[in-house]
Image (cartoon, rainbow, N blue to C red):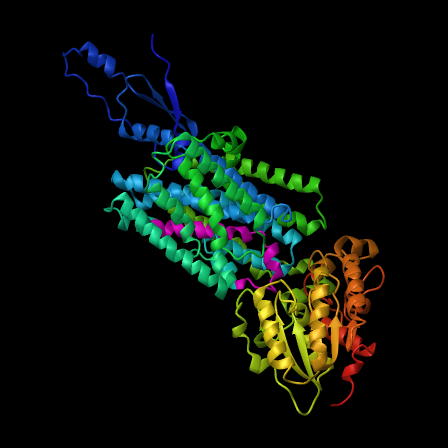
Amino acid sequence: MTAAPLRVNTLACAHNWHLPCHAPFPRPTQPSQGQAQPPHVRETRQRARITHKSKNKWKIFIYPGTLLSGCVLGCLALLRKFRPDIEGLRAVAVLGVVIFHIAPLRLQGGYIGVDVFYVISGFLITSIIRDRIERHSFSLTEFFSRRIRRLLPAHLALLIVVMAVTPIWSLPDEVESTAISAVASSLYVSNIYFASVSGYFNSQLESNPLLHTWSLSVEEQYYLVFPLLMMLLASSARHVAAAWMAVLAILSFALAQWLIGVNENVAFFIMPTRFWEFCIGGVLACTNWAHAWRGGLRDGAAALGLAAIVASFFLLHEGTPMPGIHALPATVGTGLIILAGMNGRSRLSSLALENPASRFIGRISYSVYLWHWPIVVFYEMRVAHTNPFEKALLLLASLVLGAASWYWIERRFLAIPITGNPLRFFKATVGGIACVSLVAGALILNDGFSWRFNNQQRRMISVVTGAHGDQDSGEDCFLEASKEKDPDDFDYSGCIHLSKNSQNVLLLGDSHMDHYLTGFEEVLDERHLSIVNASQCRPLVWDKGVSNCIELYRHVIDQYVKKKRFDAIVVAARWQERDILSLTRTIKELSPHVRQIYVIGPVVEYLQDLPRLLAFGRLEDADDFRTWSRLMEKRELDGKLRQAVQALEKVTYISAIDTMCGFQNCRVITPDGFPMQSDYGHLSRAGSIEMVARFKAQGLLRGLSFEP
């Protein structure tokens, strides 16, 4: 009676390790004609039978005693190496990212899941490449073919779907931006594109449904560089290769930490500042530090690693500079979990990471990551507020669509064998990129399908595109926190100087002071303006906020306000309730050195850019204002600020809310027919002129009416 065969589905090997498991067996040696085969040979040389099923799905049937080919032995070895805990760790990483995007206040540091992915990728890719190099079977063509087969099909499907849906719910400028992003993403350079266009005033970036593809571009650029590095180290011992990767990791980490202080946007997006995270996994793949770890030590390492990742989820936030020192706990924690499972299994990993649910989510994590962000972006374009039930539905939709993408796209392409003609994958890549480029070109050449909007809607949209409304901030006198964090970079002498022939007015504040600049220059053109504005830096010196902001304003007050006599100082910012005490103390320090101080209160803010709301007709009545604006919240803050500063000496409080809003709604369009604000809250150029003109007409600037 023949023993039942052991079935090994080679798709599992291909999916997790991207190695060929369908090479033909060598034929068993046959006895010469007329020669009987000895019984022991017949017993030990039972045939290995391969059957080819439809759709290129190979099943290998292995009978006891079979002399297996090298390919089958390799597949079995890889199955023994398969790490279910890493599959579960992928689930932790992707859920962190998805929950952060759906409910950022619930999991403010969930974005660190991307860095967890990078450590995992570094470990797996190094293991694969190193193993093949040692067996003298590594091929760059084959490696890239496998990466293309694994990553590109679902990615291209995403790009096509997003470009098809974007014109339905987006403004023409957003459609064009998405089209450009799609081409950049298909070439795996979207991280470079987003780094070049990111900035404090670029609110459209957050609503780009392809913004998340920056991380895929970083990983693909790593795939281009790392195999070459491993080939250079091919003749080196594993510990030597690990040492070189450790050196590169240190250099990359130092670059990241330095560049954060120079240009945080660039530091966040580019691959060299993330390379050290891949190297952490690479070093682990070339070493075996955990070979002597006992069960208790493995459990402790896994627990510490998982705790570091979860703590990062909750302790980090959107303002945390990345990817420098703050990324260390999560990335090192990921390394500890990988180490803990290298020569055994920890009980914590078995419980938390190797359960069926975690493993399944980890298996579909790539597709979940691909599709979740467009789902969130498109839903939030149509809905003002998402309640907990809706957030849960968004999470479920991301998982369901990710599972469908994995089943219908990823698995289908993973079943295609690499052997035969690997170059066909490169040809398919060129064809896919060409297809994406053609669709993107059609969107751009048609001006983002701007014909969908009438003339009045186009007037609203022109503010977003910069044709009529975006302000040209005083760039030389505006310190953008994302690019220049050092107060020494500010041009003090060029931005602060007195005139003997006109009144001298000093404007202090963040971007919500800067958006009044055009109005002051147009309406009070006879006044001489000195300007000190910095993004995300409220003009407070008695504050526990960002040290660079306090240093900037402290220097201005000590070296200029106290030594030069200004006629007036105007302060404005995106105030918060916690600023009231610090603001009153700052005003008391300023008042002995100036004739008059003007404090401008908060403006109304919206849940989406005002031009978008107007273009899509979402502010038609008072109910719409309650739905899409933060009027009540800002009115309450306005009252508290007024009460706190109005009684102070030499202070005039200017309520922007009272100037632009009634009880239930606000002025949203200027007399010229343009939106008052260019995004969620910053005034447009026309809005700035209108607001300052109204301040003057209402007598709120009468202290500036006298001659010096």
- In the rendered image, the vertical position of residue 482 relative to residue 440, given as above or below: below
352 or 275: nearer the viewer: 352
Task: Tell me which residue sits at (63%, 62%) in the image.
Answer: 544
Indicate whether residue 217 is drawn in magenta.
yes
- In the rendered image, the vertical position of residue 165 relative to residue 405, given as above or below: below
Q: In this view, does 207 lie to the left or right of 10?
A: right
The overriding secondary structure of the stretch rendered in magenta is helix
- Residue 443 on image: x %, y %: 57, 57
Q: Quadrant of the N terminus?
A: top left
Task: Tell me which residue sits at (55%, 78%) in the image.
Answer: 491
Task: Tell me which residue sits at (42%, 34%) in the image.
Answer: 298
- Residue 326 on image: x %, y %: 50, 53
- In the rendered image, the vertical position of residue 604 relative to residue 39, given as above or below: below
Q: Which residue lies furthest to the bottom in this view?
A: 501
**In the rendered image, which quarter is residue 552 located in?**
bottom right
- Residue 467 on image: x %, y %: 64, 70
Residue 561 in view, yes or no:
yes
462 or 137: nearer the viewer: 137
Q: Is residue 517 left or right of residue 253?
A: right
Q: Residue furthest top?
A: 1
Task: Tell me which residue sits at (68%, 92%) in the image.
Answer: 501
**In the rendered image, which quarter is residue 464 located in?**
bottom right
507 or 623: nearer the viewer: 507
Indicate whether residue 484 is drawn in magenta.
no
Residue 443 in view, yes or no:
no
- Residue 307 on image: x %, y %: 52, 41
Q: In which quarter of the image is the C terminus?
A: bottom right
The magenta segment is: 197-226
